[in-house]
Image: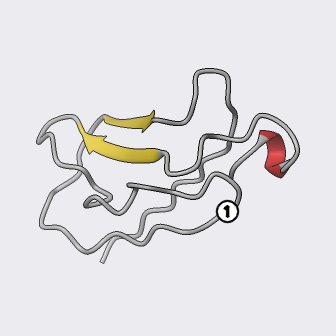
Amino acid sequence: MPGENGDLTTDLPTDQYDAALIDVASGVDLLAGEGANRSGTAADDIIAATTDVLIFGAMNLTISNAGDTKKGRVYILMQAS
């Protein structure tokens, strides 16, 4: 969600920023590249393609190209199949 608490008037990330959720053990991006080029003003969902990666342990969330003083909120929901 861009901006501080969804506030679209301040601290918006730079448009076309990138997000990745990396499984530390395997190095696989659990978003499967779907976090690239996100909108700086619109909140949106990323539904990654199913992967064959067993997730067990640490993950790293990385945000890049958003600007160094920008703010936003990330919600991560995972479902076992």
Picture residue at 18% right of the left edge, 68% below the top: 51
Residue 4 shown left or right of residue 30 in the figure: right
Residue farthest to the front, as pictured: 15
Q: Is residue 37 positioned above or below 69 on the image? A: below
Residue 56 shown left or right of residue 78 in the figure: left
Picture residue at 21% right of the left edge, 34% below the top: 24
Amino acid under disc 1: Ala
Picture residue at 28% right of the left edge, 58% below the top: 33
Quarter of the picture holding the C terminus: bottom left
Q: Position of residue 4 (x, y in %)?
A: 80, 39
Residue 38 shown left or right of residue 60 in the figure: right
Count of numbered marks: 1
Residue 8 shown left or right of residue 38 in the figure: right
Picture residue at 46% right of the left edge, 35% below the top: 65
Dot 1 corresponds to which residue? 43
Q: Which picture quadrant has residue 68?
A: top right
Task: Tell me the SS state at disc 1.
Answer: loop
Q: Position of residue 5 (x, y in %)?
A: 82, 45
Residue farthest to the bottom, as pictured: 81
Mark 1 is surrounded, within 10 Å at the Cα level, by few (under 14), some (14 to 19) or many (20 or more) other residues, namely some
Residue farthest to the top, as pictured: 68
Between residues 74 and 2, which one lies in front from this camera angle? 2
Between residues 77 and 40, which one lies in front from this camera angle? 40
Q: Is residue 7 positioned above or below 31 on the image? A: above
Between residues 29 and 42, which one lies in front from this camera angle? 42
Q: Which picture quadrant has residue 69?
A: top right
Q: Position of residue 23 (x, y in %)?
A: 24, 42
